Image (cartoon, rainbow, N blue to C red):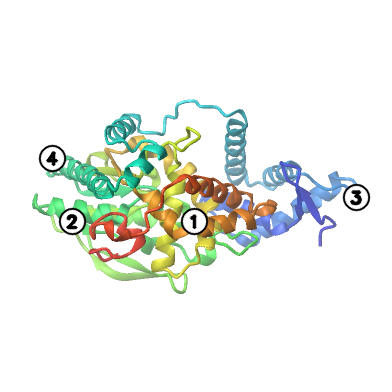
Amino acid sequence: MSRFKSVVKRDGSVVAFTPHRITNAIYRAAVAVGGRDKETSEKLTEKVIRTLEEEIPAGETPHVEQIQDAVEKVLIEEGHARVAKAYILYRAERARLREQRAERKAEPSSNIPWSKLWRVLDWAVDHNFHTVEALNERIRKDELSEIVGASEAFYQEDVENAAHLIAERKGELRMVIIAGPSSSGKTTTTIKVGERLARHDMKLVTLNVDNYFFDLSMHPKDEFGDYDFETPQALDLELINEHLSRMFEGEEVMIPFYDFKTGTRHLDQTPMKLAPNEVILIDSLHGLFPDMTKDISPEMKFKLYIEPLLQLKDPDGRYVRWTDMRLIRRMLRDASHRAYDPTQTLLHWHYVRASELRNIIPYVNTADYVVNSAMPYEMPMYKAKLFNEFAKWTETYQDDPLRADAYERASRVYKLMQSLEPIENDSIVPENSVIREFIGGSIYEY
């Protein structure tokens, strides 16, 4: 037992001292470099606590920075250099992001597909739904059918362009990767691209990389019991590479099966072999992550990235955040298809976002093409579905220091929704729309 009962956070708030948070941080760093030994993480936590007790006077409450310093010290002293490096790099990155937020820097990011973004903005301005005020005015004028039609046509054009570029490389390609962050619309886009490539006599064979998840018990877990399965290291990347390489050499491999109900993987379940004219199709969050296909020649891969690149300014002149749109999409999809309470999705989103910033966003500009899946009419429609929930979360988490991330997101979306003209009837959404992936009622099977 530790003599510490509390810890001081960076914002000055005092929360309960929970050793499991230290264990989780160490284990997360270990997973990042291929380790999965929870018992060692727990033993290292005990040494961290002993170090803190030796360095901090009795009666004094440790600061979170002191705890992190102690973790680094113990990892290095105990010979876990690679884990220490992963921990230090992640800590430094988080510090950099906090500093940027504090100073409100607006430096152009190298991770944003600027050329694509300008095209989307130009299109939004041309159609007069680049601001909340303009969009509200068009909705009040009963121009919803025109808004929906233009939005869907813009997305379909993107899909057609992507398929055309893939078909141009028909002779050399052996793999099409469709990647993007959570709820960006990868599944629907994958189906639509597949439909179009069939017209070019390209035979696509799907490799479901979800079957390569490690057992859930091997993933990091926080003090609330929530598993972090959003990282690429949650997947057996080595086995994915091995199977791809062997299939491209003409061999048959045995694909594993992952049982999501039990959180366990079963190896060697389904045989898979490629014919000479077949192309593997991968739909994955982490398709752009280099280690997923590191053994495959770049000439054999086409990488497609999906993101809702909405260009809509709120009444304060700030652009609506894409991550907020995707959060809402995932809430609706999780509730519809997985029986999750939207609150669970909100509370888990910090894992989603942290993993995106580390493992997805930095590789955006390695993609061969970017598809914009945003529909300007989405947010007004989502107001009719979740406005009361966001109001409740804003109140519930306002004074909870352990749920600061949830409060920040909920209050930001709630404020935006207050300014939007709601769209009550979602029947205006076409049955083949990418939005149906999240609200239900699609002609496609997911």
User: Could you tell me the amino acid type at mark 2?
Assistant: Leu
Query: Circle 2: is it few (<14), some (14-19), or many (20+) Cα within 10 Å?
Result: many
Q: Quadrant of residue 69?
A: top right
Alpha-carbon distance for marks 3 and 2?
A: 65 Å
> Could you tell me which quadrant the N terminus lies in?
bottom right
User: Could you tell me the amino acid type at mark 4?
Assistant: Glu
Residue matched to label 4: 168
Asked if the residues shown at circle 3 and circle 2 are in contact, with their CB atoms under 8 angstroms apart, the answer is no
- Judged from the image, the secondary structure of the residue bearing numbered disc 2 is strand
User: Which residue: 12% across, 43% down?
Assistant: 171
> Could you tell me which quadrant the C terminus lies in?
bottom left
Residue farthest to the right, as pictured:
58
User: In front here: 364 or 86?
Assistant: 364
- Judged from the image, the secondary structure of the residue bearing numbered disc 3 is loop
Residue farthest to the bottom, as pictured:
262
Q: Earlier in the sequence, mark 1 or mark 2?
A: 2
Tell me the number on the disc at residue 204: 2
Would residue 282 be seen by someone viewing this image from the given angle? yes
Query: Circle 3: is it few (<14), some (14-19), or many (20+) Cα within 10 Å?
Result: few
Q: Earlier in the sequence, mark 4 or mark 1?
A: 4
Q: Earlier in the sequence, mark 3 or mark 2?
A: 3
- Judged from the image, the secondary structure of the residue bearing numbered disc 1 is helix
User: Could you tell me the amino acid type at mark 1?
Assistant: Phe
Q: Earlier in the sequence, mark 4 or mark 2?
A: 4
Q: Is residue 442 left or right of residue 400?
A: left
Which of label 3 and label 2 is nearer to you?
3
Looking at the picture, does residue 243 appear above or below residue 418?
below
